Image: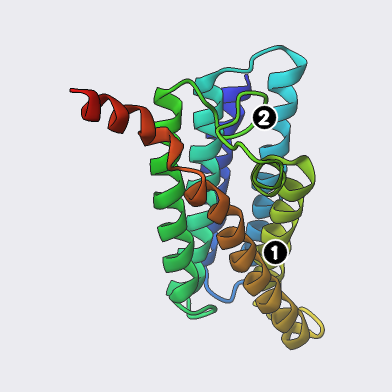
Amino acid sequence: MANFISIFRIFVMFCAIFLIVSCPGSVSAYVAALIFTIFAFALDGVDGYVARKFHEESKLGALLDIMGDRIVENSYWILFAVMGWLSILFPLIAITRGFITDTIRSAAMEKGYTAFGENTMQKSKVAKFICGSRFMRISYAVAKVAAFVLIIAARIPTLPNAKMVGEIGFWCAVFAIVFCVVRGIPVVIEAKYLFEDKADEGDKE
């Protein structure tokens, strides 16, 4: 069930993006897209809850969760850039950071580590807090949701104070993209130990 939810939220996100792209300026379409967007991000918390509740935690579940996050998040950044609502730098930064951290995490999984949880790849307390603590993960999620929801809401033709809502959404997006980079830095800094064993074995040979 948890894995199904992780995949289903991608479908919900695509429904939202389809409405925005196919019905530009439509009040009903944008309102529906806004609801789908909120629902898609709400499901990100539901899949983890279901996994813990029914003891469905697994490496596959962790991978699907990260995969879903990447697809949903990057799709919105790309959408906003294509629509001209944000600079192309936003999706470029988010996608680049995602490729780097996910590549390192793939190497970590080969050694039995996970991105988060008890068997996390992070070693220092600071890195564990920045990358895997519940506070930081929720804070980052809230920043993204606020940015995406406000940016879409600001484009609803009948919304009062749409300009102000758009400005707030823009700065939430800036905060979210900075947050995205900051949470990726410890992954890169602490990646060295993942390759030390192989390097040592090569020296011995």
Q: Name the residue under label 1.
A: 149
Of residue 145 and residue 28, the one placed in the foreground of this image is: 145
- Horizontal side of residue 186 vs 99, given as left or right: right
The x and y percentages for residue 11 are 52, 41
Of residue 32 and residue 150, the one placed in the foreground of this image is: 150
197 above or below 166?
A: above
The x and y percentages for residue 38 are 71, 52
**For the residues carrying marks 1 and 2, which lies nearer the camera in this image?**
2
Looking at the picture, the colour scheme in use is rainbow
Q: Residues within 10 Å of mark 2 (few under 14, many from 20)?
A: many
The x and y percentages for residue 58 are 57, 17
178 above or below 117?
A: below
Q: Can residue 137 be seen?
A: yes
Of residue 56 and residue 124, the one placed in the foreground of this image is: 124
The x and y percentages for residue 106 are 40, 34
Residue that sits furthest to the top in the current view:
55
- Horizontal side of residue 140 vs 88, given as left or right: right
Label 1 or label 2, whichever comes before in sequence order: 2
Tell how many labels: 2
Q: Name the residue under label 2.
A: 47
Tell me which residue sits at (77%, 78%) in the image. Answer: 159
Q: Can residue 158 be seen?
A: no
- Horizontal side of residue 83 vs 45, given as left or right: left
Tell me which residue sits at (46%, 66%) in the image. Answer: 93
Q: Do the residues labelled 1 and 2 touch (CB within 8 Å)?
A: no
13 above or below 65?
A: below
Mark 2 element type: helix
